[in-house]
Image (tube, coloured by chain):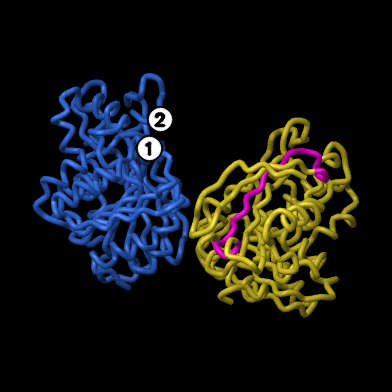
Chain colours: A blue, B yellow
Amino acid sequence: MTLEKIGANHSFGGQQLRYKHQSAVLNCEMTFSIYLPPQAEQGPVPVPVLYWLSGLTCTDENFVQKAGAQQHAAEHGIAIVCPDTSPRGEGVADDPEGAYDMGLGAGFYVNATEEPWAKHYQMYSYIVEELPTLINVEFPMDSARASISGHSMGGHGALTIALKNPGQFKSVSAFSPICSPLNCPWGDKTLGNYLGSNRDTWAQYDTVALVGQATEHLPVLVDQGEGDNFLEEQLKTPLLIEAAKKASFPMDIRLHPEYDHSYFFIATFIGEHMAFHARALGAGKA
Amino acid sequence: MTLEKIGANHSFGGQQLRYKHQSAVLNCEMTFSIYLPPQAEQGPVPVPVLYWLSGLTCTDENFVQKAGAQQHAAEHGIAIVCPDTSPRGEGVADDPEGAYDMGLGAGFYVNATEEPWAKHYQMYSYIVEELPTLINVEFPMDSARASISGHSMGGHGALTIALKNPGQFKSVSAFSPICSPLNCPWGDKTLGNYLGSNRDTWAQYDTVALVGQATEHLPVLVDQGEGDNFLEEQLKTPLLIEAAKKASFPMDIRLHPEYDHSYFFIATFIGEHMAFHARALGAGKA
């Protein structure tokens, strides 16, 4: 695998970088962003890494530009990897009506089994296997120390991926996650298309379902704004609270009055999420 | 004057708001953003305010989304007002070739005297008079405690406006300012069009020229990245360093290796700028 650097900005004493590469599992060219904190250059100890999964309509750049996470990553000595939210490019299927909630920008972090999606929409394997393998080879990362976080569709991605691979991640956090695709319109539409009509197959990508099956309990932090327009119909945080309680899975699920679904909410609490992951990762200032 | 609220997001315990209003001096509808820190709601003491002037191609939103300033504004209890960078709308003149460095998004914070610009391009009066008058009436501001800052073209705007109105501002700071429009291609083109060919009239909007005439020395902080592609041809920081020295005007002008012209640079040092202004404003934590 070959990386092509397409962006570089100095930021909080470290480097905010952007790369293109050919993804074998997604069968297309992909772009990702990575923040390397100052500690990554100082060596000799490799730095831990946080994977950030973005939400619907986003690319690798939204979090990088709007969350203000570099400040905290530099403070704790944690790298941050931001993948794109779907495969892209010529020949990659999209919503026939161009809707924002399926297809491009809306991979939902699953491995699609149905046509026309299966050829490219393998975001689960890309995030769990191909991308970390690439990152660990190309950058000074401590592959044994990784955590994962995300927003909305990416919060769903982070939670499902961490619950299915607790040995691979030290901690998981989410902002405004889609807690149960089995129980919301976004899930109905997108998993129905990507995975087919047999809803039993959807459960492997449903946080609420996975919580009930979890045998390992890694640290979980979830922040949700109570002024979020998507809360009631799409996000279904109460289902996650109930499932965690029923499964005796300790999770820190926090509800914040007035905050909405935007990056202003993420920016407000990203410092606490970074500190949470730093503790789990045994990072610098933790 | 009537304000129409067009955006509101909770942010760091305060509110990031956006408004439209009819500007008499610009002769068009204008949009601005304002961050109200938590202290603005707690009263009864009105909060001090920082005016932020953005650079070429920006609107009122770039700084709001990318600088991460709300964190520090909330900490110090300072409001931040972000105007647009030019008049906008039907009938407002633009660069005939649609270039980014003149016309829409490129008001240069001057009062144009030449056609077709003079009818709308009165950004100097808008920032110095009309907008603060509106802000002080509509929001819980302490009009006696205001500071000003900006980036690139907005750094030029902040420095020239503060130097010409030292009684109105307690402090001024700039990131990557255009230090001398009299001595760079951006100035040649834009001031030549807005103010005409008599370069003597440009000097009233040239920081380097104004430093030499200043009788009051308000606190000045300037940050400049040494990896900034515009430094040599357009920004001319050495001319400002030389002028300040010659005039015995104490300024903190800092050069930062590797940093570029982007918002990643601004985000890295905005906390130090906010602390600098907080001290001058006698704000909360200062």
What span is in magenta? B24-40
Q: Amino acid at mark 1?
A: Leu
Residue depicted at 50% across the width and 55% down the height:
B11
- Secondary structure at badge 1 equals loop
Task: Report the chain holding disc 1.
Answer: A
Do the numbered discs 1 and 2 sit on residues whose CB atoms are within 8 Å?
A: yes
What residue is disc 2 on? A100
> Where residue B156 sits: x, y (%)?
72, 59
Q: CA distance from mark 1 to mark 2?
A: 7 Å
- Secondary structure at badge 2 equals loop
Q: Residue furthest left?
A: A215
Q: Earlier in the sequence, mark 1 or mark 2?
A: 1
* Dot 1 crowding, Cα within 10 Å, few <14, some 14–19, many 20+: many
What residue is disc 1 on? A56
Residue depicted at 10% across the width and 45% down the height:
A213
Is B15 on the left or on the right of B168, as rendered? Answer: left
Residue depicted at 20% across the width and 43% down the height:
A208
- Examine the image and state in which quarter residue B255 appears: bottom right
**Can residue A2 be seen from the camera position used here?**
no
On the rendered image, what quadrant is the N terminus of chain B found in? top right
* Dot 2 crowding, Cα within 10 Å, few <14, some 14–19, many 20+: some
> Where residue A59 sits: x, y (%)?
40, 41
